[in-house]
Image (spheres, rainbow, N blue to C red):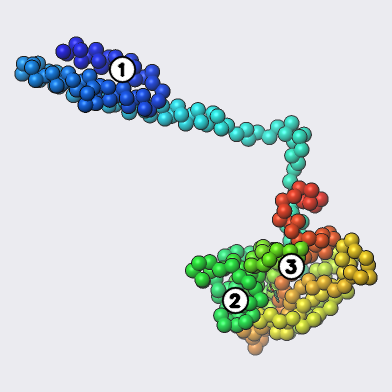
Amino acid sequence: MLDKLEALYKQFQEDVIKLHKVADVLNLKASLLGKKGALSEILKSLKDATAEQRKTIGVKSNQYKKEIEDLVQNQIKKIEIEEINSKLEKNKIDISLTDSVLEKGLQAAGLHPVSTIQREIEDIFLSMGFDVLDGPHIEDDYHNFEALNIPSDHPARDMQDTFWFKDKKHLLRTHTSTIQVRGMQGRKPPFQFVGPGKVFRNERTDATHEMCFHQLEGMMVGENITVSHLIYFMKTLLKEIFKKDFEIRLRPGFFPFVEPGFELDIRWKKPGKGESKHSGWLELLPCGMVHPNVLKAGGVDTDKYNGFAFGLGLDRLVMVKYGIDDLRHFHSGDLRFISQFKSY
Ligand code: PHE
């Protein structure tokens, strides 16, 4: 009986390593150790053996049982690794970019025109002594509204249709004016900074509206700041970008965080259309003198200091600069559009 046991084990050792499927390994194991398995049958027949035989065969069969279990586990592990390797082999991604790929049409990338104009404007303001600040896209009620003199029951909240998070406390910032609030913290007047970035509104998309667009906020705080300072910086900015003087006008505009508030318009010609009919004023730059409540929320002494702020629409500026008639091109991912603006 001992010989039979040994022969079974030897056979198992040879067979198991030839298997390449987990199910086959488990079947083979069952054919030995299962209820009706060969090894179990041997153990059953022990009832007719002598006490001595029972002891040696019992010990031996337990030892084989354990070794069979180990071999089964080893083989299963081996099969799993084989499977992973063959999957990796099949799904190989060639990450080497060869010249032939480039020849077939992939071209080196460039910056999006909005990024380009953002960098240009940052440089212009840096050269005039402004800092460039950043702020988070996900904001809280305080930084987006409350600290900007827009309490929760104020109808001005309706001017900016907002994406709220489920907690009703956080939102995607609707304007870069949040950077005014953050920028004032920890700064002592006089100071001046700009803050560019993405903003989000629940807008119906059309040729001039998107749910995600770009603004560049600006703020200057010091002693005896006036509207003429504001006009000077805005005109300088436009001249630097367009390399020509623009005729501008200020109209009254309402924003709770400025008083007085203005809309700054430029005179321009609509792209591709007849001169006289489509030329006109383009609303480009909401701005104004910072409301004392906003300065107070930022820890600024309003008896001594005041300031101006503006919120430039970067997308609109790009449209004016390049004569683009539809804002939806910007996020279209269409290479025919984007490849016209290569700059590195
Ligand atoms: N935050 C305003 C908006 O997005 C723009 C603005 C900025 C107006 C600064 C005045 C001063 O509509």
Query: Quick check: 209 left or right of 248?
Result: left
For this orientation, the residue located farthest to the left is: 51
Instruction: Give the Cα separation between the discs numbered 2 and 1.
Output: 75 Å
Q: Which residue is drawn at 73% across and 84% down?
A: 260
Q: Where is residue 247 in the image (x, y as percent from the top left)?
A: 88, 74
Q: Name the residue under label 2.
A: 145
Query: Quick check: 220 left or right of 320?
Result: left
Q: Mark 3 points at which residue?
A: 313
User: If you read the primary sequence from the N terminus, does the residue marked by circle 2 or circle 1 appear first?
Assistant: 1
Instruction: Determine the secondary structure under disc 3.
Output: strand
For the residue marked with disc 3, what is the amino acid? Gly
Q: Name the quadrant containing residue 15.
A: top left
Q: Where is residue 318 in the image (x, y as percent from the top left)?
A: 79, 61
User: If you read the primary sequence from the N terminus, does the residue marked by circle 3 or circle 1 appear first?
Assistant: 1
For this orientation, the residue located farthest to the front is: 36
Q: Name the residue under label 1.
A: 13
Q: Can residue 188 be seen in this view?
A: no
Considering depth in this image, is 105 or 126 the residue closer to the camera?
105
Tag 3: Cα neighbours inside 10 Å, few (<14), some, or many (≥20)? some
The quarter of the rendering in which ligand 1 is drawn is bottom right
Labelled pair 2, 1 in contact (Cβ < 8 Å): no
Labelled pair 3, 2 in contact (Cβ < 8 Å): no
Q: In this picture, is 118 found above or below 285?
A: above
